[in-house]
Image: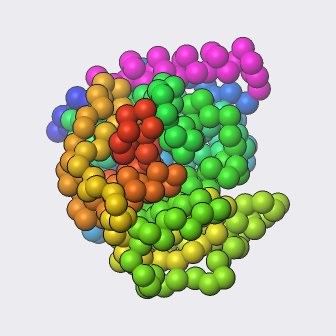
Amino acid sequence: MKREAYAAARSVSPLVHAYFARRIEKARRLTPENLASLPSAEAIEAMIDAAFWASLRREEGYQPKISFAFLSPEEAGQPLLFERSMALAPAALTRVARAVERPGIHLGVWNGGEDLSVWGATRTIPRYCFVLEVAAPGLLVVKHHSGDEAGKFVNVVLLEGDLIKLVDEHASETPECPELLTSLLGFQSSTSWADSVNVLVRLALSMREHGHGGCLLVVPAESEAWRESIVAPVAYAVSPPFSKLAQLNHEDASPDELGRTIEWVAGLTAVDGATIINDKYELLGFGAKIARRPGFEQVERVTLTEPIKGHVAARVHPDELGGTRHLSAAQFVHDQRDAIALVASQDGHFTIFEWSPCESMVRGHRVEALLL
């Protein structure tokens, strides 16, 4: 029987094709070397359709997590080549998924004949290569490499069932867009993956990955005022401050060592309470309980934004964002206006809280679409 087509694939493929065509053409005018081939709208639709149905299948209870890259074997450096190309079909993709589930490994898809086929796997892809990742059952992410050798991937579109979310590449141009959000967007950030703001990006990614939820408070290194918003004593205060992350951020450290330290610090956010670091990335404590600062009012409204096309900022009560973790983080930023708070929910939501001087209120940026 012929399977039903995934309707969202047809709806979104022309938009994705136009995005990659625009990006690749712009890059070609600046630096034409090592640029990816542009997939047709039909090829994009076919890959999204196959990936969606593969994501819903099970192989001995295993949920497939796969990443596809549209490129020829010649564009892939030293790829792993199959003797016989594999059909771009859900059943075949589910069977091979476990072999390529590690981060950074992509199944190579190309026009081998009349139809698309999978020719092997690769860890090396050219700039602006179309990448499609199966993140969870029914949840797909279209992305591309940021172009920097050590850079992150830039998310372009999220598809969750019949829901299509186009990431707004101009969201970083809005007033008071925080550096962290600009870096997560990746479209127009001039910072590299190794720059200090991206330590927070990587902490955010790791916080979301551990799946337990968590809160990370970033406070000024030159002030102790944040203590007025924390119940004393901090359950797991650190003295002297743990400075390894700060040192690695300023040294020519190996990516592996920096990555392990980031995972270590992010893992502390799984403990009930907030983890506190300063803006030099020194760890001050974890398991901290947030309290309203003396003399400050209860936070009643937060401006909620999301870097998705068509999203309109709304003013909501912090309770609408999640549970007590979100409410206490919003209160902390309301009372400590030179701090920011990163909050991960167990359900995958992720919010950055910051103070907006123009609006005189807390802003919450919902950014899980950028962290997949």
54 relative position to 251: left or right: left
> Residue at position x 60%, y 39% from top?
145
Q: Which residue lies furthest to the front in this view?
A: 295
Above or below, comparing residue 260 to residue 365 in the picture? below
Side (left or right) of 246 relative to 267? right
Q: Is residue 258 among the parts visible in the rendering?
A: no
Q: Does the magenta stretch include residue 26?
A: yes
| Residue displayed at 54% across by 17% down | 21
Locate residue 136, reporting x and y percent: 33, 54
Tell which of 275 and 25 is nearer to you: 275
Residue 80 x/y as whole percent: 64, 52
Whether residue 228 is visible to the viewer of this picture, yes or no, is yes
- Whether 131 is drawn above or below 281: the answer is above
Q: Quadrant of residue 245?
A: bottom right
Q: What colour scheme governs how the chains and residues are painted in the rendered image of this protein?
A: rainbow
Residue appearing at x 48%, y 85% in the figure: 236
First to last magenta residue range = 10-33
In percent of width and height, residue 237 lies at: 52, 83
Work out which quarter of the rendered image holds the N terminus and state it: top left
Location of residue 331 in the rendering, given as x and y in whole percent from the top left corner? 33, 58
Give the residue at the far right of this rendering.
Answer: 252
Please name the predominant secondary structure of the magenta segment in the image.
helix
Q: In this view, does 322 lie to the left or right of 330?
A: left
* Left or right: where 251 falls relative to 193: right
Frontmost residue, 61 versus 172: 172
In the foreground, 142 or 325: 325
Vertical placement of 233 versus 177: above or below?
below
Q: Residue placed at 69% from the left, 73% from the top?
A: 243
As for residue 221 lying within the magenta part, the answer is: no
